[in-house]
Image: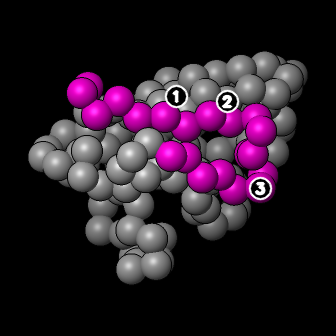
Amino acid sequence: VQLQASGGGLVQPGGSLRLSCAASGRDFSNNEVGWFRQAPGKQRELIAHITTSGKAIYADAVKARFTASRDNAKNAMYLQMNSLKPEDTAVYYCNRYYGLDLLIDEYPYWGQGTLVTVSS
């Protein structure tokens, strides 16, 4: 399964943005999926992952501000981002989540991502 994020843009600090992710291929519902981001000059990091049952687990940096969800019927997932901060500026990606099986840098596929810029 391959996933592609969309919906990024420019938003002011304190604002909100909703990202979408479309999955192609088979077995989306049978895979854990995640939202990742890569800020300028930094490594790509996991910010949230969603289990096959729909439970979302968040990194401390986004907990209580971001909400990740999935819709298996639509082969889609979403990231609602509230109370955005300048440090949230990054390229955001959605992808399968491999857990401890693979390091993020070892993931076999990455879509283009979508740029989120938080600035006044």
* Residue at the image point whose x is 36% and y is 50% from the top: 52
Earlier in the chain: of badge 2 and badge 1, it is 1
Q: Is residue 33 left or right of residue 79?
A: left
Tell me which corner region of the image, top left, top right, bottom left or bottom right, holds residue 80: top right
Picture coordinates of residue 60 (x, y %)?
77, 55
* Residue at the image point whose x is 70% and y is 62% from the top: 41
Residue toward you, 88 or 55? 55
Earlier in the chain: of badge 3 and badge 1, it is 1
Say whether residue 95 is visible.
no
The kind of residue tagged 2 is Met
The kind of residue tagged 3 is Asp
- Based on the picture, tell me whether residue 62 belongs to the magenta stretch: yes
Read off the residue under disc 2: 81
* Residue at the image point whose x is 83% and y is 38% from the top: 86
Picture coordinates of residue 71 (x, y %)?
35, 30
Q: Are marks 2 and 1 in contact (CB under 8 Å)?
A: yes
Helix, strand or loop for disc 3: loop
Tell me which corner region of the image, top left, top right, bottom left or bottom right, holds residue 17: top right
Q: Which mark is residue 60?
A: 3
Residue toward you, 74 or 44? 74
Q: Is residue 91 left or right of residue 23?
A: right
Q: Residues within 10 Å of mark 1 (few under 14, many from 20)?
A: many
Magenta range is 55-74
The kind of residue tagged 1 is Leu
Give how far apart the Cα atoms at labels 3 and 2 are. Answer: 14 Å
Q: Are marks 3 and 1 in contact (CB under 8 Å)?
A: no
Q: Are marks 3 and 2 in contact (CB under 8 Å)?
A: no
| Residue at the far front in the pictured view | 53
Read off the residue under disc 1: 19
